[in-house]
Amino acid sequence: MGKNQWWRDQVVYQIYPRSFADSNGDGIGDLRGTIDHVDHLAQLGVGVVWLSPICASPQDDNGYDISNYQQIDPMFGTLEDFDELVAALHARDIRLVMDLVVNHTSDEHEWFIESASAKDSPKRDWYIWREGKDGKEPNNWESFFSGPTWEWNEATQQYYLHLFSKKQPDLNWENPEVRQAVYAMMRWWLERGVDGFRMDVINLISKVPGLPDGPVGPTGRGSCFDACANGPRFHEFLAEMRREVFDAYPDRTFLTVGETPGIGIDDALKCSDPARGEVDMVFQFEHVGLDNNPGDKFAIDRPEHTLTNLAGNLAAWQEGMDERGWNSLYFENHDQPRSVSRWGDDSEEISPAGGTWRERSAKALAGMLHAHRGTPYVYQGQELGMNNTPWQRLSEFRDLEVLNYVAVRQAEGKVFDDMLAGIARVNRDNARTPMQWSGEPGAGFSTGEPWIAVNPAAAYINAAAQVGKPGSVFEFYRALIALRRENPVLVHGDFELLSPLADCAHPDLWAVRRMFDGESLTALANFSREDAEVPSEWWPQGASVVLGSDLDADARVLRGWEFVFLSHRADRATG
Ligand code: TEU
Ligand code: CA
């Protein structure tokens, strides 16, 4: 393993600082609160933190709209707090990866203010300005957050492009000055000690030239994504970034992960192929798209989730990245609902095998995630089995994606109550309720009024009830992360999906085998409530349980939502 691939045997923990820990009682998480909880991360055993945006921002999209890349938003703290956080993490052998949001800035960034000031401004071409067409927008694109992607600027009589909210104007990456300004900013952060970047919607930076209309969807507008993502210069820009930024530090090693919605296996392999030197890995979206309605994220009708689809898709990516590329492994982040509610069984009923169905399925999903080849990402609260919130009223939501969606439909005469069920399951605020540190009011997150309501389940799902408690979801995550550090098969082993067996009586059994250097590790899980006998094909002779979600694991029968790892030396096999 090359020294620059240190992230292969690490687990990354994502912190959404606004919702992690509030130190001063204003209801909003901050850097000092985060510093107070670094030992939680050390106990869990993660090697990297990815910190969602903390730079100066009007917070239209919770910091994914940056108005100054070299200042910390005062709501989060100061640069001194930031340096202290980096030092506290480094002292515990945890590296820090920043969120790099450079497809767009805030409309309050001085670059945009200058660009919008006059048609002949030296920064006019830093953003994407166009004349209208027949008195309307330049093309038919619908923004990710509802409504057109074009905003009219009265002063200069042109439209500017914003793929996300109108407060997130897209930078013009065709302009080399823009690229150099971004690279200089990245070097500034690396010199401050950060260990890499998670790159927000990085496959949107190169737009398809001509900005053609997109295929028309249910709203009557065209998909900007289908029309302009993965433009022709995407790989060129990533390679240039590598040369201009990361290669400037030959003695250091970084982690770079590109967020690339809609990317396919071929392009992802190009991105993460070390020989091409673009990024270390990407976040792909296929597996989180399987149960989404492609035309309308919040529609009630959506494809049913099945284990076969999820397992098969993950396996296809395992094969696709092969020995050359590398996968990032994630079930949750700040944009996704809680996985235990989405793909598990989040009932609080006690199962006959012990523990609630929610706890058991949180562990089974954890095992599944960690059993794949790649770098696992754990989102804050996932290690506690946090679930979705029981949303009821519009006033409970904070995310502009939901608020814009509802406003557009209310203007058409639709009513919120008819939209609620669809919104409740998949909205991003499910991931953004406060981290549940304890069962006290405010969940130990804040002594004040939190900016978004605490999930009522905090009373029983919280860190205080789980850390150091045998059998808890947290302790199972901790054991999985420790196993990765000790077990080269889990890191380097090749991957084979064994399930479903053609004649297997139990369609909800999942099995994979990893192999490395004569050692094999078999992961088995039961994604249902019914006990299931493990087919003998999946139970190698002489195999022993190395880690199980039940403390008394006997892998020949998997109880409802049980997970086990079996270890076995291939050359001892007798058949
Ligand atoms: O997300 C981009 C993205 O494609 C999404 O997952 C998006 O949130 C989803 O399609 C909406 O349904 C990134 C960030 O992770 C997200 O939080 C930001 O809102 C977005 O970019 C804009 O910066
Ligand atoms: Ca605060």
Image (cartoon, helix red, strand yellow):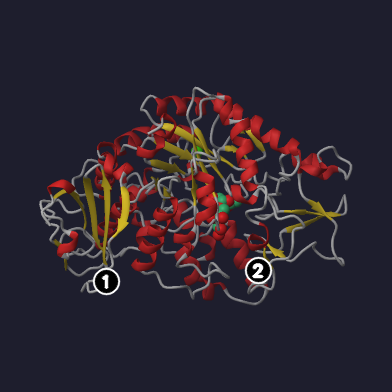
Residue 20, visible in the rendered structure? yes
* Left or right placement of residue 481 versus residue 209 in this view: left
Q: Give how far apart the Cα atoms at labels 2 and 1 are.
A: 42 Å
Looking at the image, residue 502 lies above or below residue 561: below
In the image, what residue type sits under mark 1? Pro
Q: Quadrant of the N terminus?
A: top left
Task: Give the quadrant of residue 211.
Answer: bottom right
Mark positioned earlier in the residue sequence (2 or 1): 2
Question: Residue 145: x, y in percent?
Answer: 63, 60
Element marked by disc 2: helix
Q: Which mark is residue 507?
A: 1
Query: Around disc 1, counting alpha carbons within 10 Å, would you say few (fewer than 14), some (14 to 19), or many (20 or more)?
Result: some
Q: What residue is at 70 percent from the left and 55 percent from the top? A: 208
Query: Around disc 2, counting alpha carbons within 10 Å, would you say few (fewer than 14), some (14 to 19), or many (20 or more)?
Result: some
In terms of depth relative to the viewer, which is nearer, 508 or 137?
508
Question: Residue 124: x, y in percent?
Answer: 82, 43
